[in-house]
Image (tube, rainbow, N blue to C red):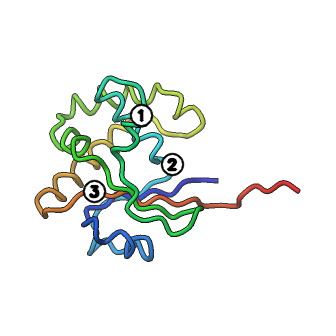
Amino acid sequence: MDIRTSFMAASENDAKAIADNPKQPERWPGFSCLNLDLEKLADLLSLIHKRPVDEALLASFSVLHQSTVDGPWVIGLPSDFLASLANWTEAEAALYANQWASLPCFNDVSWRTEDLKAAIVHLGKVATLAAKKGQTVVLYQTVEGEKVSFS
């Protein structure tokens, strides 16, 4: 089972519309990928703040819309997180990508350090675009594939 994630420049007021139909790049520019979910973003934010993931850090991500218990979810990313990403140099992005790739959350997924650096750079570009438009960056997250059930 994979987690489909999309990062887009949008207004928080668009959360329900995004959940209903997230594939509107002309309306909400950004990028999509697999398995770069909220858990991994929280780990990156913990690296930035140099503190462990805790309730306060997790609370800085705001669930803007949740269609059902099983998702999809539209989550607002913290403004300080976006500001950091938007202002990093290539060298800073590479440094954080290297640290991020070494965390246990990447043990079971196929993200390479250079892929994480590219994701950081893309997130920074989406954050810059969102700021210019007076918007934020939202994460659309949904589960793909069959659920496991036990009988």
Q: Amino acid at mark 3?
A: Val
Classify residue 92 by image quadrant: top left
Point out the tag, 3 or 2, that comes first from the N-terminus. 2
Residue 35 or residue 81, whichever sits in front: 81
Residue 63 or residue 118, whichever sits in front: 63
Point out the tag, 1 or 2, that comes first from the N-terminus. 2
Farthest right residue in view: 151
Q: Amino acid at mark 2?
A: Asn
Marks 3 and 2, Cα distance to the nearest angstrom? 17 Å
Query: What is the crowding at mark 3: few (fewer than 14 residues within 10 Å), some, or many (at least 20)?
Result: many
Q: Which residue is mark 1?
A: 43
Marks 1 and 3, Cα distance to the nearest angstrom? 17 Å
Q: Residue at x 34, y 27 (%)?
A: 47
Q: Is residue 98 left or right of residue 12?
A: right
Q: Secondary structure at mark 3?
A: strand
Q: Residue at x 43, y 36 (%)?
A: 55
Q: Is residue 123 left or right of residue 143?
A: left
Query: What is the crowding at mark 2: few (fewer than 14 residues within 10 Å), some, or many (at least 20)?
Result: many
Q: Which residue is mark 2?
A: 35
Q: Which residue is mark 3?
A: 137
